[in-house]
Image (tube, coloured by chain):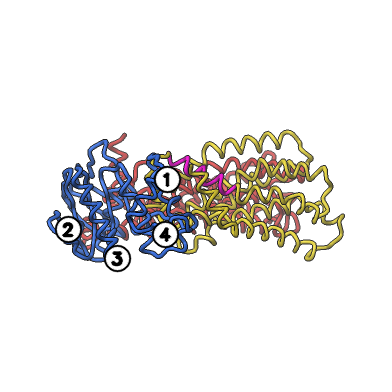
Amino acid sequence: MLQIESLSCFRQDRHLFKDLNAKVLPGQALQIVGENGSGKTTLFKILAGLFEEYEGRVITSDAAQLLYLGHRYGVNDQLTPIENLKFLLKLNENQLAPDVLEAALTRFQLRAELDQPCASLSEGQKKRVALARLILTSARIWLLDEAFSALDAPGRAVLSEVCQGHLASGGILVFSSHQGIPEFASAAQLRLAAGS
Amino acid sequence: MWRWFHQWGSPKFFYHRSGALIPVLALASGLILGCGVFWGLLIAPADYQQGESVRIMYVHVPAAILAQSSYAMMAVMALISLIWRLKIADAAVQTVAPIGACITLLALATGSLWGKPMWGTFWVWDARLTSTLILFFLFAGVLALRNAAGQSQTAGRAASVLAVIGLLNLPIIKYSVDWWFTLHQPASFTLTERPAMPFSMWGPLLMMVVGFYAWFFLAWLIRLRHELVKREIRSDWVQQTMKQ
Amino acid sequence: MLLRRELKIMLRSPAGAIQSLMFAVIVVALFPLAITPDPSQLEPLGVGLIWVVTLLACLLAADKSLVSDYADGSLEQMVLSDYPLWWVCLVKSIAHWVSCGLPLLLMAPMLAAMLAMPSERVVWLMASLILGSPILSLFCTLGAMLTVGLNQSSALLPILIAPFLVPTLILGTQWATTGGEAFYGYMLSALLCLSLVTLPIATAVVAKIAVSR
C-alpha cells in the first residue's frame, strides 16, 4: 500500500502543491497528471525518498521495496546494456544469471546491442535498458516518471505489458505521462494544478 | 528549555521579540566603540618599541578574535539547521557569512598594515596571519557555495555541511600552521601574545573587543530580520506586520 | 561490486586519468623554465612543487566521475540502493585515488628527477604521497559531491576544498623535507585515519542533498 496524506511542498517560497491525498492499494495504478513545472518530478522524488523538504506524510507498507525511474534513469555510457542492467539490479541485491539479463533485454528489443557500450545507443534504447530492470526486479512499488515518453510504439507496448503483469501480481504502479496511455485509462488520477 | 528553543525558532516570534534588541545593541555598540576608539587612539600610551603604530592593535585584535568566533557561531547555527531543520538557523548562517568574511578581511588588512612598520613589509607568513587567511578562504567557500546553489533550502544545507566540516577542521588547520611556522622561523614576535600589557593598553583593547561584538550582533540581527521577512513574504504574519 | 563498476568505467575512458597526469608533468616542466635550470636552486623547491602539483591535479580530476553519475541518474539509484551510502562514497574516493592519486604517485620519481631531487629524498616524497594522497582523494570526493549539479562546479570545487588540504600539505611536505622525522609521519597517519573514518560519512550527508537538487 502507498498512501499520501496532506502532502505539501514549497520551492522558493511558492507552493508547488498543497494538500495532496491519495491511496493506492496492491494491484492498483495511480497516474500523476499535471503541466510542466507543476511538481510531478518533485512528487516522485518525495515518494522515492530523495527529497525531504515537504510537509505531510508518505506511508508505504513496510516490506514493500521501491523502484524509482526518473528522467535520468542511471544508464552509464561506458558500460554495455548487460553491465548496466546487472549493476542496477545488484544495487538492490538481486543476483541474476547472465542469460536472464539477456532475456529481459531481448524482450525490450536490445538483442543486437547487448555488448556495445551504451554511448552508441539512442536515447530511447538507453531508456529500454533501464526499463528492462522492471522485468527482473522484486520491488513491489514502481515509481515511473515519464517512463512512456521517448519510446516507440513496440517499446511502449512491451512496457505496458510489463506494467500490467506487475499490477496483476499485486504490485503498485505510480506513473506520470503527458500522452494518455489507453491501457491505464481507468487508473486513478492525481492532478497537480500549476501555480496554486 | 525545549519550549523556549521552539519559540525562538519560529520566525514570527523571533521577528517580533528581537525588534526591541536593536536600539539596545545600537546604543551599546556606538557608545562602547566610541569610548574605545577615544581611549585607544588618543589616551592610551604609545608603545616604547613600536611607537604610534601600535594603535592598529585596537582594531586588529578585536577583528581577529571576532573573525574566529563568528565562524564558530556560523558553524553552530549550521549544525542546528542541519539537525533540527530550523529555517531561522539557516537564515542565520546565510546572513552571518558575509559579515564574518568582512571581519576576517578587516583583520587581514589591519594585520598587514601593522606589519609594514613592524616587519618592514606588508605581508609576512606569520602563523596567525596565515591561519586568518585560511579562515577567510573558508568563509569564501561557504559564500561561494551558497551563491552558486541559489536560494533554496537544499542550497542552504549544502553550505551548512561545509561550514560544520570547516569548524571541525579549523583546529587541525590552526595547529598544522603553527607547526609549520615554528619550524620555519622560531617565533620571535607575535602580534598579540605580548608580555604583561599595562592596563592603560589592555583596558581600551577589552573595550574595543566588547564593542566589536556588540556591533557584530547588531549587524547580524538587522540582516537576519531582513532575510526572514524576505523569505516569509507570502506568510500572514509578514503581511500583517507590513500593514501596520 | 560498486568498485568493479568504477574501475571498469575508468578503464573504458582512461582520458581523464591521463589528462591529470599530463597536467602534472607539464606544470612541473614549466617551473625550471620560469625559474632556473640550475639543479642547486631547483632542488630545495622539489618536494613542495610536486606536492602542490599533485594537489592541483587531484582537484582538477575530482568531479569527473561524479558529474557523469549525476547527469545519467546513477547517483540517484545509488542513493536509493541497499548499500550504505557512506560505502558508496568511500568507493568513489577509492576510485578517485586509483585514477588520480596512484598514477601521480608512480609518476613522482620522474617528476623528482626533473627537479633534480636526491634519491633518498625521493623515497620520503613517495612515502608522504602514499599517506597523503588518499586524504586528498577523500576531500576531493567531498568537494565533488558538494558542487555536483551546480553551474560553475569545476571552478567552485578548488575554492571550497583547497583550505581543507592545508594540514595534509604541511604535514606531507614537512615529512618529506625533514627526511622522515617520525612526528610528522605519525601525524599524517593519524590524519589519514581520521579522514578515512569521518569523510565518507560527511560525503554521504552531502550526497543526500545533491540528489534532491
Name the mark on residue C212.
Answer: none
Q: Does label 3 or label 1 sit earlier along the sequence?
A: 1
Crowding at mark 4 (Cα within 10 Å: few <14, some 14-19, many 20+): few
Crowding at mark 1 (Cα within 10 Å: few <14, some 14-19, many 20+): few
SS class of the residue under badge 3? loop
Quadrant of the drawing holding the N terminus of chain A: top left
On the image, numbered disc 3 is attached to which residue?
A152
Q: Nearer the viewer, residue A156 or C95?
A: A156
Q: Does label 3 or label 4 sit earlier along the sequence?
A: 4
Chain rendered yellow: C
B41 w.r.t. B178: above or below: below
Crowding at mark 2 (Cα within 10 Å: few <14, some 14-19, many 20+): few
Display colour for chain B: red
On the image, numbered disc 4 is attached to which residue?
A112
Left or right relative to C63: residue B156 = left
Name the mark on residue A98.
Answer: 1
Discs 3, 1: same chain: yes
Mark 2 touches mark 4? (CB < 8 Å):
no
> Which of the two discs, 2 and 4, sits closer to the camera?
4
